[in-house]
Image (tube, rainbow, N blue to C red):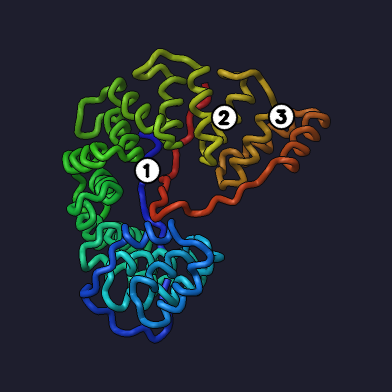
Amino acid sequence: MRVRILLSCLLFLVPDGARAIEPEKTSVLELQVNEQVRALTSDQVPKLIERARGDDIQAQCVLGVAYARGAVVPRDDAQAIKWLTKAAVLGVSWVQNLLGVLYRHVAKQPEDYAEAFKWLHAAAEQHHPVAADNLGYMYLNGEGVAKDYSQAAHWYAIGAAEGYAPAQNNLAQLYEHGIGVHKDYAAALTLYRQAVEQGLASAQNNLGAMYEAGLGVTKDYNEAAKWYRASAEQGEPIGQSNLAFMYAHGHGVQRDLKEAAKWITRAAESGYAPAQGRLAQFYETGQGVPLDYTLAYRWYSRAAAGGHEASKRALALLSQRMTPMQLQAARTALLNQEHFAVGPSGVIVERKLPAQQWPRE
């Protein structure tokens, strides 16, 4: 079996000496706050701050979210934490989740992870599905709390029961691999399919991998390719990489190295390091693309910078075969390459499990 996906949530913030967390008794609608943030103009900000200082909880939420996003006001995590905490201590679950996400995002000290855990736990206890999924991730990775796989499964199950697709996908991963729960392919398949019904690209990829490996189902490359394609067409880089593999080997599709190169290129361009390393192999060997050591060097370099160990070794070997002119051209291209800082676009961030290396043909 090859590449799988484990989703998690970005986590993020809270101040010292916060009051005891209360059950939710104040209603502040997340959708309404988001609409107000989108409609906010700069001339409305002074009045909004005045209302927030006057303990208007709706204004505090709008201001906190605006600072967290950098909407109209400059992005300021400290200010976001300050205003959102006022609503979080009143038990507003979606604010508690956002606060936990902010603390995780800025975490530099163990205390930051502990604050993230505290707020996510408070929201998850109210069955906020995203918070439950985030809390499961913290237990899974031992962030802000001792690592505990059974607790990870417990909180993922709460998010999954609320119909949250990423939590369904995560819990399915645990059942598939027997992490914190007894290994149960049937349960994993049920959960993957529930997430797939909601169109979750990572679950489509994982369902494809179950069919490819024949886990709980009859091995079926056609079904595997179908679900990899569904995932790939949504822009999921691991699905794109897996679909490329199917084309490269003729599994469930007609063997087509050009199609393989097309999909692995899309995955590589998204920043997925294993795909970057595989694309470099394509250019190094001329599979599906013209033979080009300069481009191979560039893609191996990007993959190596992303921590792909096999690409580090391949880069060293390729460098020995390249001419001084080729090396200079490749290194110059890397220096001139634009670098984009990728920031969080939302609450959920996909976590990739380590990819197995494709064998050279």
- Which quadrant holds the N terminus? top left
Q: Which mark is residue 298?
A: none
Q: Mark 2 points at which residue?
A: 279
Residue at coordinates 56% horizontally, 65% vertically from top-left? 74
Q: Position of residue 80 (x, y in %)?
A: 46, 71
Mark 3 is surrounded, within 10 Å at the Cα level, by few (under 14), some (14 to 19) or many (20 or more) other residues, namely many
Which of the two discs, 2 and 1, labels the residue nearer the N terminus? 1
Q: Do the residues labelled 2 and 1 touch (CB within 8 Å)?
A: no
Q: Name the residue under label 1.
A: 5
Q: Which amino acid does label 1 sit on?
A: Ile
Residue 114 visible in rendering: no
User: Which structural element holds mark 1?
Assistant: strand
Q: What residue type is labelled 2?
A: Leu
Mark 1 is surrounded, within 10 Å at the Cα level, by few (under 14), some (14 to 19) or many (20 or more) other residues, namely many
User: Which structural element holds mark 3?
Assistant: helix
Which of the two discs, 3 and 2, labels the residue nearer the N terminus? 2
Which of the two discs, 3 and 1, labels the residue nearer the N terminus? 1
Mark 2 is surrounded, within 10 Å at the Cα level, by few (under 14), some (14 to 19) or many (20 or more) other residues, namely many
User: Which structural element holds mark 2?
Assistant: helix
Q: What residue type is labelled 3?
A: Thr
Q: Nearer the viewer, residue 145 or 196?
A: 196
Q: Position of residue 35 (x, y in %)?
A: 37, 57
- The single residue placed furthest to the top in the displayed view is 254
Q: Name the residue under label 3.
A: 294
Q: Nearer the viewer, residue 335 or 147?
A: 335
Mark 3 and mark 1: Cα distance apart in space: 31 Å
Residue 215, image quadrant: top left
